[in-house]
Every structure is written in structure tokens, then in C-alpha cells.
Amino acid sequence: MGWTAATDDNGVTGYDILRAPGASGGTFTQVGTSATTSYGDTGLTPSTTYRYQVRARDAAGNTSAVSNTAQVTTQPGSSTGGCTAVPTVQTHWATGYVIQPLTITNTGTSAINGWTVTFTLPAGHTMAGSWNGAVTVSGQTVTIRNAAHNGTLAPGTGTTSVGFQVNRPNGNTALPSGYTCA
């Protein structure tokens, strides 16, 4: 933001920048200073209204009255397409189990057009089959990518699910861990 330079018989040495939250109410507090007639504010919340006032300082330490109030609204934040993956054990037996559903939810503010879930199988566990996703395994790390029919998830609450079956050593009751979604 910028403003017209102030004049003073002692010489203007800088400006105090004051900010208040919202379109009305709220208290103005000093958020910065500037030696020039401009100021760039940072760390603001996206899609939020702020009000600004400026006062000049001179070489003798005097300050002017505050300027008229300028109101600004910040730009929307960048859209995100974050997601979560939450597993549910459908059934299990001594040498295996089925995770169904593994629910993938779009927690972001924009649609997701393709997702990837990664997790770690316990030692000795092996994938036996899967559905509704493309699975790759590297060591104990499993990656599931969307199928053609379930890759697009609406912002905020769009969900889909996949499932898989795992073989395990007899009596080993450990389950996969470290689910991440991108």
C-alpha cells in the first residue's frame, strides 16, 4: 500500500503503520514502520478484510494525527487438495485380513483430480489382492493410486474407497500403519 508524503517543519523521518481487523470495530495497533511512502504487510489471513491508518513521525519525535482509513481485503489463499486415508478392518483370520473400506476424503478447498495413498505393511505381511485402485509394492511400502473412475473428489468432503487383502504370518495381529494421502 502507498500514500502521499507528509511534510513537517522538523522533517518527516518515517511513518507508523496501524492495522485493525475487519471492516468495522477492532482496535488499531501498530504493525510496522516505513521510511518511505509505502508498506507491504505480510502474514495476513486469506480472504480477510483489514483496515489501515498511517501517521507520520518527525525528527523531533512528534507524530501526526492518523490518516483516513484504507480498507483492503486479501486475496483468497491458494487452493489445496489435501486428503486423508482412514482404514477399516472388515474381517480378519489367523493368516490374513481385509481392509475395506480404506476411505479417502478430500480435505482441501479445491477438487482433487488424482490421489495417492501410501502406507507400510508390518514385517512378513504381503498383499494378496486389491480393488478400486492401482497398487504397487516396494518392500513393505504399499502405494495405491486412484482408478479411472474414482480419482476426482469434490472439495471439502468428496470421498471414495478402496480395499485390499493381506496375508500375514499365523497369529501375527499387527496391521498396516503410516497412512498418508496426497
Image (spheres, grey):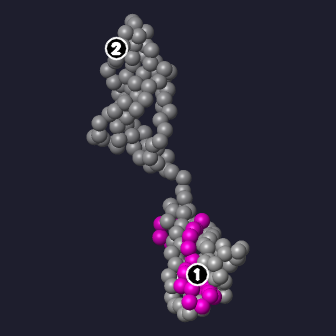
Q: In which quarter of the image is residue 65?
A: top left
Could you tell me how many numbered marks the image carries? 2
| Label 1 packing within 10 angstroms: few (<14), some (14-19), many (20+) | many
**Foreground pick, 62 / 101:** 101
Residue at 51 percent across and 75 percent down: it is: 86
Magenta-drawn segment = 154-182
**Foreground pick, 92 / 48:** 92
Determine which of the numbered discs, if any, sits on residue 25 in the image. none
Where in the figure is residue 107, as x and y percent of width and height? 49, 65
Where in the figure is residue 128, as x and y percent of width and height? 66, 88
Where in the figure is residue 87, as x and y percent of width and height? 52, 78
What is the distance, in whole Å, between disc 2 and disc 1 at their CAs? Answer: 68 Å
**Foreground pick, 167 / 116:** 167
Determine which of the numbered discs, if any, sits on residue 162 in the image. 1
Does residue 137 appear in this view?
yes
Determine which of the numbered discs, if any, sits on residue 62 in the image. 2
Label 2: which secondary element:
loop
Residue at 54 percent across and 52 percent down: it is: 78
Q: Earlier in the sequence, mark 2 or mark 1?
A: 2
Q: Quadrant of residue 174?
A: bottom right
Residue sticking out furthest to the front: 171
The amino acid at mark 1 is: Val
Residue at 51 percent across and 71 percent down: it is: 105
Q: Is residue 132 magenta?
A: no
Residue sticking out furthest to the top: 9
Does residue 151 appear in this view?
no
State if disc 1 and disc 2 touch (CB < 8 Å).
no
